[in-house]
Amino acid sequence: MKISVKVKANQKTQSLEFQSETECIAKLKSLPIKDKANQELVGLLSKHYGVTKKDIEIVSGHVSHIKIVEISNLD
């Protein structure tokens, strides 16, 4: 499953707001420095979907605030 994620870094709270099944806004506490925001996003998505961090891959947008994320091993 692929989803489009709009990332808002350096927020006070951490959350996922789903606009539809394949689009969401991720509010992250981390700054987008040295891949910390991407790592936080992967952790947040893994908790939400109940999969391991290895099952989540950022396909495109590593340095952009809009990312395409692929989630595998969903039941």
Image: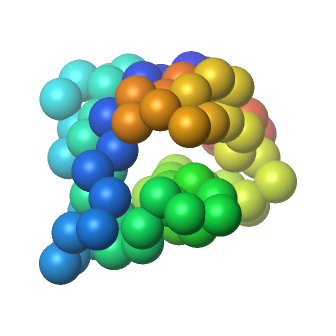
Q: Nearer the viewer, residue 29 or 48?
A: 29
The way the protein has been coloured in the rendering is: rainbow
**Measured along the vertical axis of the image, is residue 35 above or below residue 2?**
below
Side (left or right) of 46 relative to 56: left
**Measured along the vertical axis of the image, is residue 29 above or below residue 1?**
below
**Measured along the vertical axis of the image, is residue 51 above or below residue 4?**
below
Q: Which residue is outermost to the bottom?
A: 12
* Quadrant the N terminus occupies: top right
Residue at left offset 57%, top offset 54%:
38
Q: In this view of the protein, can residue 50 be seen by the observer?
A: no
Residue 73 found in image quarter: top right
Residue at left offset 62%, top offset 36%:
62
Residue 16 in the image: x percent, y percent? Answer: 28, 53
Side (left or right) of 62 relative to 65: right
Q: Nearer the viewer, residue 73 or 67?
A: 67
Residue 32 in the image: x percent, y percent? Answer: 47, 58
Q: How many marks?
A: 0
**Measured along the vertical axis of the image, is residue 41 above or below residue 65?**
below
Residue at left offset 82%, top offset 54%:
54
Q: Which residue is outermost to the front?
A: 33
* Quadrant the C terminus occupies: top right
Residue 25 in the image: x percent, y percent? Answer: 26, 41
Q: In this view of the protein, can residue 24 be seen by the observer?
A: yes
Side (left or right) of 23 relative to 1: left
Residue 21 found in image quarter: top left
Residue 46 in the image: x percent, y percent? Answer: 59, 58
Residue at left offset 32%, top offset 25%:
23
Q: Nearer the viewer, residue 47 or 28?
A: 28
